[in-house]
Image: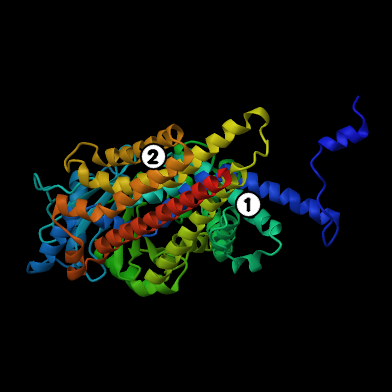
Amino acid sequence: MPSLPAVRSRLPPLPRRVEGGAGQGRFRQTQAWLHTWCGLWFSWLLFAVFLTGTLAVFDEPITHWMTPEHHAEEAAAAAAPKPATADRAQRLAWGKAYMAAHHAGAPMWELWPSDADGGGSLTAYWFDEKRQYVSAQLNPSTGQPMAAIPGRGARATLGGHHFVDFHYELHAGAVGLWIVGIAAMAMLVALVSGVITHKRIFQDFFTFRPGKGQRSWLDAHNVVAVLTLPFLFMIAYTGIAISGATFMPAPRLVHYGTGDAAQQRFIADLNGGLPERSGRAMQVPDLEPFAARGQALMGQPVRAVVIDHPGDAAARIGVYGWNGEADALRRLSPTSGMVAFSAATGEVLQVRQPGGAEGGTASLAQSAMGGLHMASFGGWAVKWLYFVCGLAGAATMATGAILFMVKRRGKHLGEFGGATARVYRLIEALNVAAIAGLAIACIGYLWANRLLPVLLEQRAAWELRSFFALWLLALLHAFARPPARAWREQLGAFALLCLLLPVLNFSTTGDHLPAQLRHGDWESAGVELGALAFAAFAFHALRVMRRRDRAASVSTLASVA
């Protein structure tokens, strides 16, 4: 049996006595351990979630850039004389007649008669036999279904919504949602432990020492983390809260049971509940009187009229409102107004004012958290604030992961025994692929949008495959090349892809940045200016890396001499 001094010599050194006692010192040491390892193992996934979530803030401009065929249609529609279109009453009558003739057995009809000004398109939606949400565009002047023009179809794409879906479910459905939820919990743990670990966190915020190696990485990590600390707490907490019914399913399962039918009842109750079918037939009544009464009660123009159980005497008619720009500026909760009627008697069953929520204060709080998480309030100023804070949050994850290896490049700490060198190599490669490789995959997704044939079958899926294929190639490249070279080569590829994106757009569509600025197409111009800004950042990072490598070479030669 080893002696007591021998055993003690193998243990990690006790923490130094600090102000407040050794207990506090040990506690801070355990929090530092938790911050390091919890942050490292989740940093790659959290970086991906943060970067794609940040891009998702501008999903509509990205979608606009990725559907250039719509630009020409919008310009032609704006230049053409406005055809005479029908009023809302006539549009609703056409929509009802179309659904009765073609989809009478659908369990739900949803008619979008016009835009908030009474013009625009006329669209019908319904659930098919697989409960898939499908739609048909009707001519707002005649009510007839509008056929697609052969050879002029817009390219199929997920557009910016790809980034929305990826950042909260990784395109993996409920499994992806759970993975992201667990990562968000780990992020809250890393944030709390990070605050406890850094005794001088707010002093560190004003300290950045460039060109100091490990010290510079730590300063950068502290600065971006402290700068965005309230944002990081808010975005992680609200992200978990808005999916609370999924992460805490026990009450739902006990009350509703399992299976698709139970899930549908749960969703229906969240939206005010649905009446049971009566089994007695009744024609869907004229919808305009319901739309007019609903508009008066909720104080918003009519966005949609939804008929549940059409053709049954227990049918319910819901009238939903349009949220205006002023509404979005002043309300956290993004819900619009809604009024529900009994189709048989015209009785008002339910009224939800704009910004309200069914289910009381808890539902309203969840709705407000959803608005807070998705930046659905405050207009462009809040979107840009979220974009900047999101990039800073991604930088916090990236600098933390890089700092872990910078600390260990010159000195092995032996955390993994004989496998330490191999684990360090794995972490180096994952750092490159998760940070630079993901950036390449994101810009490559835009390149795929322009390079894939417009009428390619399953085109949207091929764009998505391009994204993941590029990311996988970046991972293989990171393992095949030495870490320093892998960083330079992937950053260089990213910079070139960003720099040449406007050239690619011009060569494939004829559209270009000066024309976008001249025509006031700020959504397309914003995407291409953003790409150029990312290219400038990547080139600057490459320049710093080359300067650092030259300085290291000179230092090595001097020491040899």
- Number of residues whose C-alpha sits closer than 10 Å to that of mark 2, classed few (under 14), some (14–19) or many (20 or more): many
* Residue 93 percent location from the top left of the image: 19, 59
Specify whether residue 252 is in view. no
> Which residue does the image show at 62% across and 29% down from the upper left?
419
Q: Earlier in the sequence, mark 1 or mark 2?
A: 1
**Quadrant in the picture for residue 522:** bottom left
Residue at the extreme front: 561
Toward the viewer: 60 or 393? Answer: 393
Q: Name the residue under label 1.
A: 190
> Which residue does the image show at 43% across and 66% down from the upper left?
351
* Residue 113 percent location from the top left of the image: 23, 61
Which numbered dot is residue 198?
A: none
Proximity of marks 1 and 2: CB atoms separated by less than 8 Å: no
Placement of the N terminus among the 4 image quadrants: top right
Specify whether residue 21 is in view. yes
The amino acid at mark 1 is Ala
* Residue 352 percent location from the top left of the image: 44, 66
Toward the viewer: 168 or 420? Answer: 420
Label 1 or label 2, whichever lies nearer to me, is 2
Distance, label 1 to label 2, CA atoms, is 26 Å
- Number of residues whose C-alpha sits closer than 10 Å to that of mark 1, classed few (under 14), some (14–19) or many (20 or more): many
The amino acid at mark 2 is Trp
Placement of the C terminus among the 4 image quadrants: top right
Q: Mark 2 points at which residue?
A: 471
**Side of 429 where 154 appears, left or right:** left
